[in-house]
Image (spheres, rainbow, N blue to C red):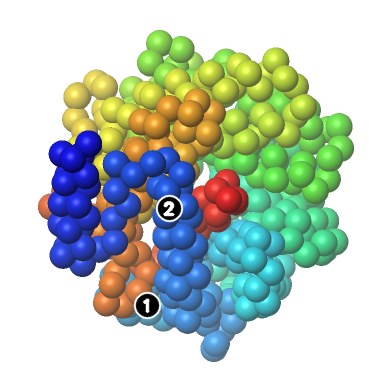
Amino acid sequence: MKTKCLVIIALVFIESVSGFSQINSLLPPEQKLLLLKKACEEELINNILSWWSKVMPDEVNGGFYGRVDGNNTIIYGAPKGGILNARILWTYSSAYRMTRNPEYLQLATRAKDYILEHFIDREYGGAYYSLNAEGEPLDTRKHTYTQAFFIYGLSEYARATGDKVALTVALEIFNLLEKHAFDTMAGGYFEAFSRDWSRLRDRMTGERTPADEKTMNTSLHIMEAYANLYRIHPVKRLKEKVRSMVEIFLEKIIDKKTGHLICFFDRSWNATSKIDSYGHDIESSWLLYETAQLLNDRKLLEKVRATSIRIADAAMEGITPEGAMLTEKNNETGEVRTTRSWWEQAEAVVGYLNAYELTGNEKYLNTAINAWNYINRYFIDRTNGGWFSNVTPEGTGRGDKAGHWICPYHNGRMCLEVMGRIKK
């Protein structure tokens, strides 16, 4: 006992002189959970949302700027991406729903109004992929992945406020996806369409061969978006679609041999890649379980529970000794991408906290704690605020602070999930 106490004291001392408040993995689980909740709540309020609230609103052209570089320099002429704006809408809507802070409602409403005014195509329906800096349509393609995030954001605003217009537009986009993007022969959703919803074969979410017609990534966020819409509009058709996406993951997307997700497919769900994407693995592990909980099917939920844990175990292959989550492994070449991206670290915190909830196994809690400690030490910009989008293996933060894909959604959601799951 004396030796253990000395070890704890030494670790606390090392962490304190390093300048970063780290959560000690030797503490009892209850203390670790409370410290994690406190840290994430402070990070959300005092850094993530405060940085985005201060830096991103475009007071000249409306909405939000399209890009901020790693030095906090606003790139005034940058396009405004649909994914960025939809994720801003989701983040501030969810933050308002949980905290009832009127400042977050103001930013959520700003995002919602700008989306309805500028991103929604009044002639053909759906949302544009991007606008120019002045808010005029730039890339008018209808990207299934992007449409899913508009459903996700608008449904969250409706969930937080009861707004009927946001719900109506979310349902309109849902109906367009079911009409144009749903594959009636093999299930799932095609990826890209022209403005008038003619199907395209453009590679927009990392597809690498002409055979790629469906992706894990788009499927994951369709499931996520439809589940959120179903929460506030629990009709039979939506429930059936949510169930079908859960079943597609169980039957098609999760590799039964390895527990990893298969990233790319042809139309008939034959795998066209040998990539293990660690961040998507751990993100899907908790989103899949969260979605299955909505269906009120005990047998299905137990199956998903076991699968969720198996995916989390497979994703452990991407965890480094210092607690970081790596990007991916190419199983054809053996190459491992050693990039540490902000979103993968955030999803590791939530995914392993979820695995701990499902099992009570403290190894998962410690993995979540270590991921947070890594974030806290390397990703948070202590000088200018916000997060770096990636970190070198040596621990140097770099990359844009905001951009088409770089949003407050992953890290903001991480904090909100921790706050919501750790209630006492």
Q: Is residue 250 above or below residue 194?
A: above
Label 2 neighbour load within 10 Å: few <14, some 14-19, many 20+ = many
Say the numbered circle drawn on residue 233: none
Q: Which residue is mark 2?
A: 36
What residue is rendered at 54% in x and 28% in y? 358
Q: Is residue 106 left or right of residue 424?
A: right
Could you tell me if residue 166 is visible in this image?
Answer: no
Between residues 79 and 139, which one lies in front from this camera angle?
Answer: 79
Q: Is residue 27 left or right of residue 1?
A: right
Q: Is residue 337 above or below residue 56?
A: above
What residue is rendered at 83% in x and 45% in y? 233
Q: Nearer the viewer, mark 1 or mark 2?
A: 2
* Residue at the extreme front: 2
What residue is rendered at 49% in x and 20% in y? 254
* Residue at the extreme left: 394
Q: Which residue is mark 1?
A: 75
| Precedes in sequence: disc 1 or disc 2 | 2
The location of residue 419, given as percent across then percent down, is: 55, 54
Name the amino acid type tagged 1: Ile
The secondary structure type at the circle numbered 1 is loop
Between residues 29 and 318, which one lies in front from this camera angle?
Answer: 29
Name the amino acid type tagged 2: Leu
What residue is rendered at 58% in x and 51% in y? 424
Q: Is residue 24 above or below residue 60?
A: above
Q: Is residue 330 left or right of residue 242?
A: left
Label 1 neighbour load within 10 Å: few <14, some 14-19, many 20+ = some
